[in-house]
Image (cartoon, rainbow, N blue to C red):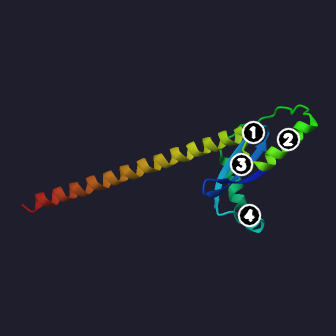
């Protein structure tokens, strides 16, 4: 089952794509910028939908909440439905956990890239200094 939620997070509108398969939940989060209209959201999904699905399928999976809902009093159900309709930022705890894991994995990958770049720059600086030292020594 695939679910898309769009909500306001600070100054930006954010979309959360949740995929539930075999009791496992995978989530990806993306920023939309200004409030999207329905046609704009549809065009966005037509253009980037497959990339979002691939991103969500690569995200780490967490167990989905598979508890059976208990029977609720009809008045209480109406109150809960009204509250849920009023609240646009509905994200399940499992989806929050999946987003956190995805963010951490992206952070680790970015840190590894930064470290490799720093090492390459340091090696380049050492090589340049070594060449200058050799050239100065040859000029004597």
Does label 3 or label 2 sit earlier along the sequence? 2
The residues tagged by marks 2 and 1 sit, at their Cα atoms, a distance apart of: 29 Å
Residue beneath label 3, please?
A: 89
- Percent coordinates x, y for residue 121 in the rendering: 34, 54
In this rendering, which labeled residue sits more in front, label 2 or label 1?
2
- Closer to the observer: label 3 or label 1? 3
Which residue position is annotated with label 4?
Answer: 41
Q: Nearer the viewer, residue 10 or 114?
A: 10
Give how far across and how far down residue 115 sits, in percent.
Answer: 41, 47
Circles 3, 1 touching at the beta carbon (< 8 Å): no
Q: Quadrant of residue 14?
A: bottom right
| Disc 1 secondary structure class | strand
What residue sits right under mark 1 in the picture?
Answer: 24
Q: Quarter holding the C terminus?
A: bottom left
Quadrant of res 42: bottom right
Query: Cα distance, mark 3 to mark 4?
Result: 17 Å
- Cα separation between marks 3 and 2: 17 Å
């Amino acid at each position: 089952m695939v679910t898309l939620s769009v909500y306001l997070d600070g100054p930006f509108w954010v979309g959360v794509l949740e995929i539930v398969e075999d009791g496992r939940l995978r989530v990806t989060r993306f920023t939309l910028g200004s409030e999207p209209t329905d046609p704009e959201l549809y065009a966005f999904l037509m253009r980037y939908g497959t990339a979002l699905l691939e991103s969500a399928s690569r995200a780490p999976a967490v167990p989905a909440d598979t508890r059976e809902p208990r029977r609720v009093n009809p008045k209480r159900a109406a109150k809960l439905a009204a509250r849920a309709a009023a609240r646009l930022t509905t994200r399940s705890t499992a989806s929050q956990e999946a987003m956190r894991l995805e963010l951490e994995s992206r952070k680790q990958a970015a840190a590894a890239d930064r470290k490799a770049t720093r090492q390459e720059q340091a090696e380049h600086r050492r090589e340049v200094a070594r060449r200058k030292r050799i050239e100065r020594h040859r000029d004597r």
